[in-house]
């Protein structure tokens, strides 16, 4: 029978849904589908019930959501099973088996490091519906509730199921991080990210992890048409999207987590419910407790005794629950050999980017020398001792570490930073800056490694404040951004560095003028040639006043200004400027000087452009 074929069965079910929804017309379907994040055209939706040809999954998905939205707007009840997207997906794949997994592996792209799942990760029931359809989703809740882990689980689930072929994960604590993440994605894709996300054939997920200020997202939200997940401690009203609140574990979730984590140590599981209750069921606090219980062979009752010594009723405050469990874990780590190394090592890690710290930074000579001054040890620890300390912190759940990268939970990082004085923060940030610059490769052969170094530089600059504001690692990070295909991010970072230099050293200081020159350069490289011309014109006058008209820095500024004029379209101005510069160079430096040769080559270039 024709109706028994999977493709006919799919068509029949879609027509039945259309009828149940009230027979909405194509314009209404498109309107409601767009409201739910789809970007499918009117004609494609109209063809679902009237055509016998093939169907794209994106069209079926938009049609089902369009029917659901239309019915809801008219208070027409539709059975839940008729709107279950996973069931529609299964039916579609039976009807069009060749469409399943048609995207080649080579065309599937992941950008940004997705956090690894925590040991014995417990999928949250409340987050499971996010996978069903496109849209903008807000995972909200207190710190330590498992928002990042839930988003990472969702991302990997969609990726393994081939529901998406583009996965972008961006730490989103600051606007600079978001802009840099978008720039990195555009560089990877080879075209503007907005164009990529607007492609109807591209199935994508963008995760903005740990948004702390809604203002940072102004103008930076991904467009409709795919899946966007935002994790945040902000109230949902501050953002735009469908909220999925994540709070503490339920009693059953906490018991299941602890039972699984302690499965190899049944003798320690003498009071699972008590531990969970004392910590308010907060996933991060419960996970830290489980790791310490396993590491020290401590029964749950013994852990509760230690916890009680830190004050009763910690379960009433999520931050206090995590702080209490964190404190117990750090104390345990400090007892491991070499004793006392854990606290300063965590302090150093806390001023870096929690989403990914390259292990070489934590093994650098600058790190070892700083630890020697801040840990009760007789000399700088060797690499073996540092790796052993990192492994201990990993076992205790204070960090997640492998051979290349260390990550920290954002709340753990915040609590560690809050426990440091301003002087301690500045000292740790200075050491981290020295270590980062020490291990920065030249040339940069691994884009991911360089990106983590740049993110770490941003983090330590924010944590350390003025004492590290002018550290050379910031200029290195600006250069790295520009040469790795992120000129706009380089221009922004260079502008901030120039402003800090002027504020701390004065507007006429040679380093200030150099920093302004770098900012103008990257402004031009980012496409704002006219803005670069204006910046160089102002800088040239001040360079001549501070250094003198014939100083090499002033001549460099003249050359850069002339080149920027050419890029801005003033080719005649560029030719005239380089002709004047060449005449001065020949007169004062001689015809064979490298500066003269450079001016001659630039003049020839712009003359060729003019003709």
Image (spheres, rainbow, N blue to C red):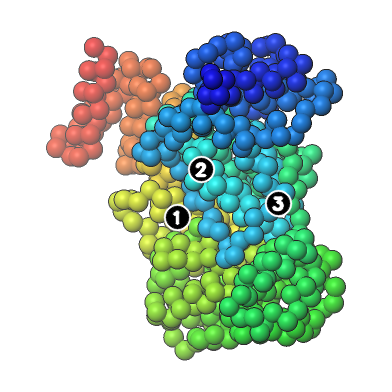
The mark closer to the camera, 3 or 1, is 3
Q: Which quadrant of the view contains residue 284?
A: bottom right
- Using the numbered discs, state the Cα–Cα distance from disc 3 to disc 1 in whole angstroms: 36 Å
Mark 2 falls on what kind of element? loop
Q: What is the CA distance from the residue labelled 3 to the residue labelled 2? A: 19 Å
Q: Is residue 46 left or right of residue 493?
A: right
Q: Residue at x 57, y 20 (%)?
A: 3
Whole-percent x, y for residue 206 in the image: 56, 39
Nearest the viewer among 101 and 368 is 101
Q: Is residue 236 above or below residue 295?
A: above
Nearest the viewer among 548 and 280 is: 280
Q: In the figure, residue 188 lies in which quadrant?
A: top left
Q: Are marks 1 and 2 in contact (CB under 8 Å)?
A: no
Quick one: SS at disc 3? helix
Q: Are marks 3 and 2 in contact (CB under 8 Å)?
A: no
Mark 1 → mark 2, Cα distance in angstroms: 32 Å
- Give above or below for 527 relative to 108: above
Query: Which numbered tag is attached to residue 125?
Result: 3
Q: Which mark is residue 161?
A: 2
331 above or below 535? below
Label 1 belongs to which residue?
Answer: 453
């Amino acid at each position: 029978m024709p109706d028994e074929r999977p493709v006919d069965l799919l068509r029949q079910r879609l027509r039945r849904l259309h009828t149940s929804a009230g027979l909405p017309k194509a314009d209404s379907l498109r309107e409601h589908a767009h409201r739910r994040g789809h970007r499918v055209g009117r004609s494609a939706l109209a063809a679902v019930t009237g055509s016998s040809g093939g169907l794209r999954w994106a069209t079926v998905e938009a049609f089902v959501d369009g029917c659901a939205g239309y019915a809801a707007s008219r208070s027409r009840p539709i059975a839940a099973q008729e709107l279950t997207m996973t069931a529609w997906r299964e039916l579609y794949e039976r009807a069009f088996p060749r469409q399943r997994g048609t995207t080649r592996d080579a065309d599937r792209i992941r950008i940004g490091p997705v956090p690894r799942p925590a040991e014995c990760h417990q999928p949250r029931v409340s987050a499971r519906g996010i996978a069903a359809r496109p849209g903008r989703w807000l995972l909200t809740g207190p710190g330590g509730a498992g928002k990042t882990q839930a988003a990472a689980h969702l991302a990997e689930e969609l990726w393994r199921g081939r529901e998406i072929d583009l996965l972008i994960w961006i730490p989103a604590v600051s606007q600079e991080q978001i802009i840099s993440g978008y720039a990195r994605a555009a560089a990877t894709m080879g075209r503007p990210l907005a164009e990529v996300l607007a492609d109807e054939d591209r199935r994508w997920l963008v995760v903005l992890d740990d948004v702390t200020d809604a203002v940072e997202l102004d103008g930076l939200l991904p467009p409709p048409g795919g899946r966007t997940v935002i994790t945040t401690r902000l109230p949902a009203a501050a953002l735009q999207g469908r909220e999925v609140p994540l709070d503490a574990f339920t009693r059953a979730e906490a018991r299941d987590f602890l039972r699984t984590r302690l499965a190899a140590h049944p003798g320690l599981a003498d009071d699972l419910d008590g531990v969970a209750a004392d910590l308010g069921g907060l996933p991060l606090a419960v996970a830290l407790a489980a790791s310490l219980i396993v590491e020290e062979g401590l029964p749950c009752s013994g852990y509760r005794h230690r916890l009680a010594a830190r004050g009763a009723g910690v379960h009433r405050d999520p931050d206090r629950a995590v702080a209490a469990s964190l404190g117990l874990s750090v104390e345990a780590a400090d007892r491991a050999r070499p004793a006392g190394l854990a606290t300063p090592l965590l302090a150093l890690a806390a001023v870096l980017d929690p989403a990914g710290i390259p292990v070489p930074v934590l093994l650098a000579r600058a790190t070892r020398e700083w630890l020697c001054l801040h840990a009760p040890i007789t000399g700088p620890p060797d690499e073996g001792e540092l790796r052993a300390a990192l492994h201990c912190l990993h076992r205790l759940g204070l960090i997640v570490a492998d051979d290349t990268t260390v990550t920290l939970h954002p709340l753990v990082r915040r609590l560690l930073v809050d426990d440091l004085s301003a002087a301690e923060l500045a000292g740790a940030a200075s050491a981290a800056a020295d270590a980062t610059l020490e291990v920065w490769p030249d040339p940069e052969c691994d884009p991911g490694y360089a990106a983590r170094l740049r993110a770490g530089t941003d983090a330590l600059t924010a944590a350390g404040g003025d004492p590290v504001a002018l550290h050379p690692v910031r200029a290195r990070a600006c250069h790295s951004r520009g040469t790795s295909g992120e000129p706009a991010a380089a221009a922004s970072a260079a502008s901030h560095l120039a402003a800090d230099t002027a504020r701390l050293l004065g507007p006429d200081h040679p380093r200030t003028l150099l920093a302004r020159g770098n900012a103008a350069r990257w402004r031009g490289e980012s496409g704002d040639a006219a803005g670069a011309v204006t910046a160089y014109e102002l800088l040239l006058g001040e360079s001549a006043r501070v250094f003198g008209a014939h100083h090499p820095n002033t001549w460099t500024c003249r050359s850069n200004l002339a080149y920027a004029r050419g890029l801005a379209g003033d080719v005649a101005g560029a030719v005239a400027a380089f002709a004047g510069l060449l005449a001065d160079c020949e007169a004062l430096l001689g015809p064979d000087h490298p500066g003269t040769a450079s001016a001659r080559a630039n003049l020839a270039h712009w003359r060729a452009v003019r003709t």
